[in-house]
Image (cartoon, grey):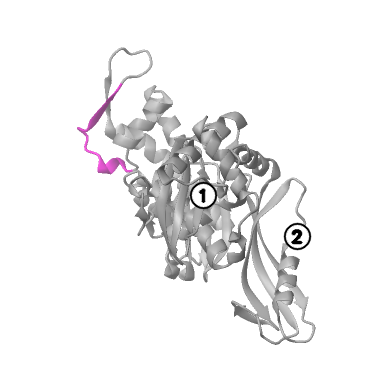
Amino acid sequence: MEKLHLATIDIGTSKICTLIAQVESENAVKILGVGIEPSQGVRKGMVYDIQQATAAISKSIRKAERTSGFQISDAIISIAGSHINAINNKATVSIVGGCIDEYEIRRVIDSVKAVPIPNNRTILHTMQRTYSVDGIEGIRSPLGMYGRRLDVEAHIITGATATVENLKQCILANEIEVNSFVLNSLAAGEVVLSDIEKQSGVFVCDLGAGTADLAIYFNNDVWHTNSLPIGGAHITNDIAQIFHLSYNQAEEVKKIHGSALPELIDDEEFFYARSFGQEESAKYSRKELASVISVRVEEIFQLIRQDIKRSGIDHILPAGMVLTGGCALLPGIERVASNVLGLPVRVAKPENLTGMIDQLDSPAFSASVGLLYWRMKTEVIEDPQSRKADPGEALSKVRRFIRMLFP
């Protein structure tokens, strides 16, 4: 039997990552192709230059296709940014005949989706939580039950239509169909959160270059999501300003010499960098660098703390926060986060991967890998019909194969 192949594209402020994988089982994929490319034309989850973004996405796709030997025709795409909004909604339907069948379940789900959405907003996710039958709460699946009233709660996530369409155009220009958009934090949660954490109460923070993407889980359901326009790029800009460095220099200094905790650095530790207007490199204190970084890191987690408190469910987080994303690599950041949030914090990355995994063994790729597991869960396990062959798929692959030969 031919194995299924899945493709995903993670579009961030600092990088674009295309992955092609083979489904090995219901909970395992083998990475066949990886295409990592510096991001262009995208900042904080929004497209600022369609031509640049399209070209960078194309390079990422081609790298993944060449390493895997497969041409892709469709993919799911990550999405983030301050344009993301979410609401919790509840709907009720009366049951005709007493027995709850698939039709009644579809009816109540359609009802919960029927919230007033402005024309400039697009629904990205409708995540139903538990059902209630005649007031009995906590029902995971009401199919086959008897009752007169069926209720459902749902977490509905929307994005700005213009931003969604701009991202979509960048993908379509590469002759790739957009299967769906998936919120970054939900993708990351697929690979860094345990079932026990999701049940007990936890929130995941995917802290990247341009955004901090958050999702709160409780009783295995999503209760709150947000995407804050803050991230590692702010830290890099601070370093560039204070030490008079270019952005690229500051980013390198942050990665090699940076720390979020000045007390981890000895007074006699230094690094060398050439500032603007200087012909030779100068010596700088690593403790001073850490002090600059720590101020911004504390501010980031204060903003995250405020968002979690505004959610109204900050009291149901015994498992604390799971931190991932590129910024999670900064030494000492989990201690700063724990001090600010008053919660246990652990740093996580994708685990138990097979195939071409060397580049992906980092918190920076949690969302990228999580997209694969999200797609496998929603298409292969929950909705296998969605993987039926598209009549235009073969033609699309031929066109893209020719373009690869003659770029």
Q: Which residue is mark 1?
A: 8
User: Does residue 115 appear to the left or right of 143 in the view shown?
Assistant: right
User: Does residue 355 appear to the left or right of 94 in the view shown?
Assistant: left
Q: Nearer the viewer, residue 356 or 183?
A: 356
Q: Residue at the location (27% across, 20% down)?
A: 282
Q: Amino acid at mark 2?
A: Val
> Where 1 falls versus 337 (above or below)?
below
Q: Amino acid at mark 1?
A: Thr
> Where 384 falls versus 266 (above or below)?
below
User: Does residue 87 appear to the left or right of 379 in the view shown?
Assistant: right
Secondary structure under the numbered disc 2 in the rendered image:
loop
Upstream in sequence: badge 1 or badge 2: 1
Q: Which residue is mark 2?
A: 115
How would you rate the neighbour count of disc 1 (Cα within 10 Å): few for under 14, some for 14-19, many for 20 or more? many
Residue 239 in picture, x, y percent from top left = 39, 30
Q: Residue at the location (65% across, 53% down)?
A: 391
Q: Residue at the location (27% across, 43% down)?
A: 263
- Farthest residue toward the left? 268
> Where 73 falls versus 25 (above or below)?
above
Residue 138 in picture, x, y percent from top left = 59, 78
> Where 152 falls versus 233 (above or below)?
below
- Whether residue 314 is visible, yes or no, is no
Secondary structure under the numbered disc 1 in the rendered image:
strand
Mark 2 and mark 1 in contact (Cβ < 8 Å)? no
Q: Which residues are magenta?
A: 261-273
How would you rate the neighbour count of disc 2 (Cα within 10 Å): few for under 14, some for 14-19, many for 20 or more? few
- Whether residue 7 is visible, yes or no, is yes
